[in-house]
Image (cartoon, grey):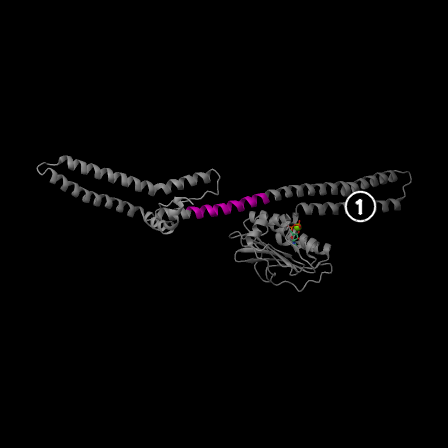
Amino acid sequence: MTARDQLDRPLHPWLKRLFGRLLGVSLFTKILVANGAVVALGAVAGTYLTAEHVKASPHGTHYEMMALMGGAGLALSLALNALVLRAAFAPLALLERTARRVIAGDLDARVRLGPVRDPHTEQLAKTVNAMLESLQVHTRQLEEYSVRLRELSDRVLLAQEEERLRLSRELHDETGQELSTLLLGLRLFRDAAGAPQPDLPALRAQAAQLAELARSTLDGVRVLALDLRPRMLDDLGLATALRAYVDEWSARTSVPVTYSTQPDGGPPLPVLPPTTEIALYRMVQEALVNVAKHAAASAVRVSLTTVDGALVVEVQDNGRGMTLPKSASDQAAAGHAGPSGPQAREAPDAPDAPDAPDAPDAASGLSAGIGLFGAQERISLVGGRLAIESAPGGGTTVRAIVPLPDHAPTSAA
Ligand SMILES: Nc1ncnc2c1ncn2[C@@H]1O[C@H](COP(=O)(O)OP(=O)(O)O)[C@@H](O)[C@H]1O
Ligand SMILES: [Mg+2]
């Protein structure tokens, strides 16, 4: 142990506190005390020295003494003020250095004040540090979000490519095949019809077969077209297009769907901008595809209602449900709900207990699928938000809330 350590040890705590107190007074007090000290020192030393000087040479005018006193007082005052101001403004230089480090990208930089501190600069340093702390947290969140966004956009591109592949395969293998068969059939028909004595009943049967083939090809093309873009949406509006889709989905999956628009007797749904309509349509489509794929539900409810100047579109199933991330921020990070997204909780008004035969014991978790994320992005792009409520065994509700345009003209729903 060095001599310095020995000295430091007993004195250290209370001396430090005392110095801290003294050095921590405000800039105003520091300057006041420093100048007071200079004046007091000047007065005492000046009086003493003058008295001594007068004693030594009682008959002089003592100009040299006045000059000496004045000069020493001024020098001392300037030096002390400079020292005090320098020490008091040091934290500002420190703040500036910290700000430069942050600008250069060092988000771990913090203002660390020395022992000489002014309550105001200390407060400023604390506030700056708190600001940097929150900046760091937000930056980290943003980085995580952008990584996730990049992953998702990769997956979106992949999904788009897969969808194109599916369409191309469907057009080639199904529609193309059927059209080839139709072409062949028509050639045979032409040859048979061109024979010297055509067999009219056989020709009629052949024509009926070809017509049937053309009709089924047309059906396939229609389904494909509906998948790509619901024309009904442009022609008949959201409520009717959704009803058609819901009916078709229910017939295909054999899951009964209750579809409702507005409570009975309510005003008709307002006309929405086309981008909003397509976003809502795709959201319902995605939610129903999810019900078919993941929920094992025995009943589904789809509803469109206007509440407080907003249109609420809800798809509710009584299936196996899923585990949602605990906090809303998790959900936002996972891209599955807006800032006011729901917590994991039981969906209100859920239909009675699910009786799906193939529902496994464990409900699925909200995995990093892109379906719901895509729906959420779409809805938020049109100024709305998507909320998901679900609990294992408690069904799932996907709800989009979009603001209604002011004074929108109304249309029959
Ligand atoms: N209605 C639902 N019932 C139960 N689980 C669901 C339901 N909807 C979504 N999920 C769960 O949430 C996950 C994410 O859904 P989604 O984003 O559409 O992706 P994907 O359908 O491609 O898996 C699904 O994988 C599934 O586990
Ligand atoms: Mg999906």
Tell me where the magenta segment starts and ends, as one range: 128-148
Where does label 1 land, which residue? 213
Hey, which residue is sitting farthest right in the picture?
A: 197
Residue 369: percent from the left, percent from the top? 64, 49
Q: Amino acid at mark 1?
A: Leu
Residue 98, image x, y percentages: 43, 41
**Within 8 Å of ligand 2, the CB of disc 1?**
no
Neighbourhood count class around disc 1 (C-alpha, 10 Å): few under 14, some 14–19, many 20 upward? some
Residue beneath the point at 57% across and 52% down: 330
* Viewer-side residue, 309 vs 31: 31
- Report helix, strand or loop for mark 1: helix
Q: Quadrant of residue 259?
A: bottom right
Q: Is residue 271 visible?
A: no
Quarter of the figure with the N terminus: top left
On whether residue 139 falls in the magenta region, the answer is: yes
Q: Dividing the picture into quarters, in which one does residue 160 lie?
A: top right
For image coordinates 13% across by 35% down, the residue present is 63
Please state if 140 lies on the left or on the right of 2 as rendered.
right
| Majority secondary structure of magenta residues | helix
Left or right relative to 197: residue 211: left
Residue positioned most to the bottom: 352
The residue drawn where x is 76% and y is 42% is: 175
